[in-house]
């Protein structure tokens, strides 16, 4: 099929295949029929995905590269591909270690299509599970975070109960059931580990990915020098829903400050934009820019670090904030901000002063976020337009964007068995 037609087909695909959403809601009841349908549809989907993936060559240098085609950002098929590859098979930052400091503390969330729970068990061991009951798939824990009332997890639907190590310990009214062993019906575990004050999970792998952790360790060391692993106090979590693909948000973050002068005039006037520099590594990139000395909120050197795929750490003035961008479909995402302040900064100010400082900082930070929402949602509408398909990079500033796309392309190619171009 010629590429223009493939592109059109992808734009129509959500409608053509909306029937698949219908099948998934009947998955358990019509298991056989659904399985056959998916087997029939997948090769079709993969062959269209392959052609769109091939349109971005990861070997082309940034100076002559074109950006990935808009289908990467606008089709449900790429969203599915990313749930299968990026959000199922990588280490992902999902929360704060201090939220699961003590036995029976937990937090929950959703990555790709997978609800998860992270908890500390009664032996002080950190654990992560798919937050999916093995009976009929209800989410076992439905609050975002807290402390369990007891040392077990009870599903709110029919009461199946699990120990904090995931074992199924109670399931009533199963008299007459055959070919069933409780041993095989524990909560499914995920890989879990900590990195400084943060918790990561990996849905389908418990193994260490040495390359990933070796690559990001120097970033931890430079953040530690600024009090990353200790000396910070958690202040507040804020969350935004955005009508754009999650990668549009990442692209906006990684453009080397290109949009700051035009789109964030207040922030831009507090920064020395000429000092902007970007360093790209295998699994992360770091942008640095110095703040003007008369600006408390952003004084000193600001560090904006992106860790593949969806996590950002911003260190500026006395602040550290983490952003996690989570896909909620092909054209919708959630961005979660966790804000921390330097302990010594807090202690140096009176209660009213610190309240005022936090309030003013949140107003400034929310303004920047609203400006980015305006940009990202506008880009998403443009990407869906028939007028746009591919764009170009400003090579000296947008090389972190390019590196992000190269990493995605390599993962897609690998998953779809595409050999070297
Ligand atoms: S779905 Fe959990 S007990 Fe039935
Ligand atoms: Fe921005």
Image: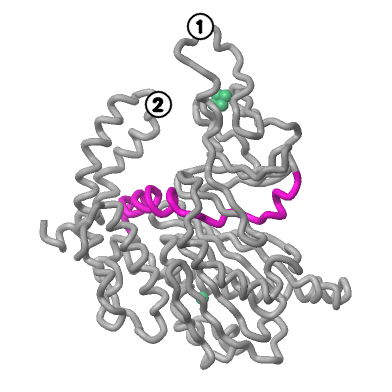
Residue furthest to the top in view is 176
Residue furthest to the left in view is 1
Q: Position of residue 299 (x, y in %)?
A: 68, 85
Which range is magenta? Answer: 74-102
Residue underneath mark 2: 28
Instruction: Give the main secondary structure of the magenta stretch.
Output: helix
The quadrant the N terminus occupies is bottom left
| Separation of marks 1 and 2 at Cα, in angstroms | 21 Å
Closer to the N terminus: mark 1 or mark 2? 2
At x 50%, y 83%, the residue is 260
Which image quadrant shows ligand 1?
top right
Q: Left or right of 397: which side holds 109?
A: right
Q: Left or right of 210: which side holds 364?
A: right
At x 59%, y 22%, the residue is 158
Residue toward you, 293 or 241: 293
Magenta span contains residue 105: no
Residue toward you, 30 or 90: 90
Q: Position of residue 107 (x, y in %)?
A: 65, 46
The quadrant the C terminus occupies is bottom left
* Front tag of 1 and 2: 1
| Circle number at residue 176 | 1
Residue furthest to the right in view is 350
Check disc 1 and report its element: helix, strand or loop: loop
Q: Position of residue 333 (x, y in %)?
A: 48, 57
Q: Left or right of 79: which side holds 92?
A: right
Check disc 2 and report its element: helix, strand or loop: loop
**Residue 388 appears in view:** no
Q: Quadrant of residue 98?
A: bottom right
Above-or-below relation of 393 to 148: below
Above-or-below relation of 364 to 340: below
At x 58%, y 69%, the residue is 313
């Amino acid at each position: 099929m010629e590429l223009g037609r493939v592109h059109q087909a992808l734009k129509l695909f959500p409608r053509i295949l909306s029937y698949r959403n219908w099948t998934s809601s009947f998955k358990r009841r019509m298991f056989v029929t659904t399985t056959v349908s998916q087997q029939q549809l997948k090769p079709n989907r993969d062959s269209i995905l392959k052609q769109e993936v091939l349109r971005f060559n990861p070997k082309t240098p940034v100076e002559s590269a074109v950006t990935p085609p808009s289908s990467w950002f606008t089709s449900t098929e790429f969203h599915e591909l990313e749930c299968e590859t990026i959000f199922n098979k990588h280490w992902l930052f999902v929360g704060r270690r201090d939220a699961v400091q003590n036995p029976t503390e937990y937090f929950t969330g959703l990555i790709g299509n997978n609800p998860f729970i992270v908890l500390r068990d009664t032996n002080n061991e950190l654990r992560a599970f798919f937050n999916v009951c093995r009976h009929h798939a209800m989410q076992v824990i439905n609050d975002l975070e807290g402390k369990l009332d007891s040392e077990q997890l009870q599903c709110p639907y029919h009461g199946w109960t699990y120990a904090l190590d995931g074992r199924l310990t109670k399931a009533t009214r199963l008299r007459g059931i055959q070919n069933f062993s409780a041993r095989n019906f524990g909560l499914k575990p995920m890989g879990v580990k900590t990195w400084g004050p943060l918790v990561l999970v990996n849905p389908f792998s418990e193994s260490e990915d040495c390359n990933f952790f070796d690559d990001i360790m120097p970033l931890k060391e430079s953040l530690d020098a600024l009090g990353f692993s200790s000396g910070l106090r958690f202040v507040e979590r804020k969350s935004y829903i955005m009508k754009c693909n999650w990668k549009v948000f990442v692209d906006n973050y990684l453009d080397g400050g290109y949009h700051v002068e035009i789109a964030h005039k207040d922030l831009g006037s507090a920064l020395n934009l000429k000092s902007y520099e970007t360093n790209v590594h295998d699994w992360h990139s770091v942008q640095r820019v110095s703040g003007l000395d008369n600006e408390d909120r952003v004084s000193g050197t600001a560090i904006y670090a992106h860790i593949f795929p969806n996590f950002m750490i911003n260190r500026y003035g006395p602040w550290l904030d983490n952003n996690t961008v989570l896909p909620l479909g092909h054209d919708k995402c959630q961005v979660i901000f966790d804000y921390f302040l330097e302990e010594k900064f807090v202690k140096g100010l009176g209660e009213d002063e610190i309240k005022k400082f936090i309030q003013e900082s949140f107003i400034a930070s929310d303004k920047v976020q609203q400006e980015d929402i305006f940009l990202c949602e506008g880009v998403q509408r443009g990407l869906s337009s028939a007028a746009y398909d591919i764009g170009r990079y400003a090579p000296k500033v947008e090389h972190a964007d390019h590196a992000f796309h190269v990493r995605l392309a390599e993962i897609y190619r690998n998953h779809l068995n595409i050999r070297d171009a």
